[in-house]
Image (tube, rainbow, N blue to C red):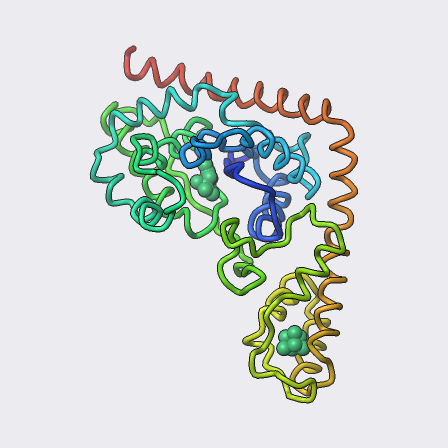
């Protein structure tokens, strides 16, 4: 008998255009995983609404644009199930049930919650829903009985809470309904923003997957390099240079080594080094953008993919909810 594939669920909030950080931090990993697991990849628009509710006009547009990028980067709708969270209402039903069994203290103590309240000063997130952010995430994951959840390190507290909610449900109901999902961290080091700070929409320090070559060139030319390298004849220190980090991620080991030695020996100047990097990035983006253009020209195809995906997700979600209702007895 063929062994059933393990289930994966992951999601992204549609709060903007996707950038290189999403490519190396998530999408490249998702592309690999779709061959080995039964993958559900979700646009978490309700999660996005929790912070964007004052200006939700672009949520739908970004949801579709993000899925276009996923597919352009190699996510295959024939292999993975792609869907939009708000098209599967069962997420909210399970969220409500999990809300009943999640003590307030668990949520108030969640480090991501405290950090966001402190740092996300441009949004009013002192709301009822935002406190429950990880409860909805637990519902996303457990609705599909996912065992593996590929996420960044920042999401570990949410995975911890997901396991606690799962255990608590199973314990209270005296039935083994939900699994204990594990985070799967991506192996790549985090790609920093163009200014070497954290890559973030609010710092406007990233290269979008849809940036045209001229814009990529301009952005790379503006990147900070080794601050001690003032003249071209000064030897450089690639280990403190953000460009070198990009090389490590986007070029071959061999090429990286050449850049490293040439930089240390002042054989290459920073301007040339930037031109080379821009060339490499544009080469990486070209096939993605070609695919993007094709998909944008055929919007109906994306709509069909999302409809098929939502139907598939929904049938899995409905099966779980039937079991949950039966277990609780409502
Ligand atoms: N909280 C995740 C993030 O901001 C997005 C997300 C929502 C998610 N639901 C999920 C990730 C379920 C993994 C699994 O990145
Ligand atoms: Fe950075 Fe390249 Fe300049 Fe070296 S030559 S400091 S790696 S930009």
Task: Answer yes or no: is residue 146 visible.
Answer: no
212 lies above or below 39: below
Coordinates of residue 37 in the picture (x, y in percent): 57, 37
Residue drawn 40% across and 33% down? 50
72 lies above or below 283: above
Where ligand 2 lies, by quadrant? bottom right
Residue drawn 32% across and 22% down? 96
Residue drawn 62% across and 52% down? 20
Q: Quadrant of the N terminus?
A: top right
- Is 37 on the left or on the right of 301, as rendered? left
- Is 273 on the left or on the right of 166, as rendered? right
How many numbered marks have been drawn onto this rendered protein structure?
0
User: Which of the pair 90/268 is nearer the observer?
Assistant: 268
Coordinates of residue 118 in the picture (x, y in percent): 31, 50
Task: Answer yes or no: is residue 34 visible.
Answer: yes
Name which quarter of the figure residue 291 lies in.
top right
Q: Residue furthest top?
A: 330
User: Which of the pair 16/177 is nearer the observer?
Assistant: 16
Residue drawn 43% across and 26% down? 143
Coordinates of residue 310 in the picture (x, y in percent): 57, 22
Name which quarter of the figure residue 173 lies in.
top left
User: Which of the pair 169/44 is nearer the observer?
Assistant: 44
320 lies above or below 35: above
Q: Quadrant of the C terminus?
A: top left
- Is 314 on the left or on the right of 97, as rendered? right
């Amino acid at each position: 008998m063929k062994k059933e594939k393990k289930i994966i669920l992951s999601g992204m909030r549609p709060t903007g255009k996707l950038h290189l950080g999403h490519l190396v931090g998530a999408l490249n990993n998702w592309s690999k995983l779709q061959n080995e697991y039964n993958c559900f990849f979700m646009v978490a628009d309700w999660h996005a609404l929790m912070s964007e509710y004052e200006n939700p006009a672009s949520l739908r547009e970004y949801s579709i644009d993000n899925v276009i990028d996923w597919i352009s980067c190699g996510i295959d709708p024939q292999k993975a199930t792609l869907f939009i969270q708000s098209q599967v209402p069962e997420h909210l039903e399970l969220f409500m049930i999990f809300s009943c069994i999640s003590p307030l203290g668990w949520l108030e103590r969640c480090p991501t919650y405290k950090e966001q309240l402190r740092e996300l000063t441009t949004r009013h997130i002192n709301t009822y829903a935002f406190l429950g952010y990880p409860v909805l995430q637990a519902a996303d994951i457990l609705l599909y009985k996912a065992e593996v959840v590929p996420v960044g390190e920042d999401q570990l507290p949410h995975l911890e809470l997901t396991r606690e909610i799962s255990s608590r449900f199973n314990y209270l109901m005296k039935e083994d309904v939900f699994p204990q999902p594990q985070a799967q961290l991506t192996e790549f080091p985090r790609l920093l923003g163009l200014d070497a700070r954290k890559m973030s929409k609010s710092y406007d320090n990233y290269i979008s997957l849809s940036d045209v070559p001229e814009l990529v060139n301009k952005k790379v030319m503006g990147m900070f390099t080794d601050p001690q390298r003032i003249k071209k004849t000064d030897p450089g220190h690639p280990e403190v240079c953000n460009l070198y980090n990009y090389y490590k991620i986007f070029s071959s080991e061999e090429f990286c080594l050449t850049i490293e030695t040439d930089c240390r020996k002042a054989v290459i100047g920073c301007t040339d080094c930037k031109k080379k990097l821009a060339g490499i990035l544009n080469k990486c983006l070209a096939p993605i953008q070609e695919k993007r253009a094709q998909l944008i020209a055929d919007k109906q195809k994306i709509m069909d993919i999302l409809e098929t995906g939502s139907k598939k997700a929904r049938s899995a979600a409905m099966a779980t909810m039937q079991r949950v209702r039966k277990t609780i007895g409502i």
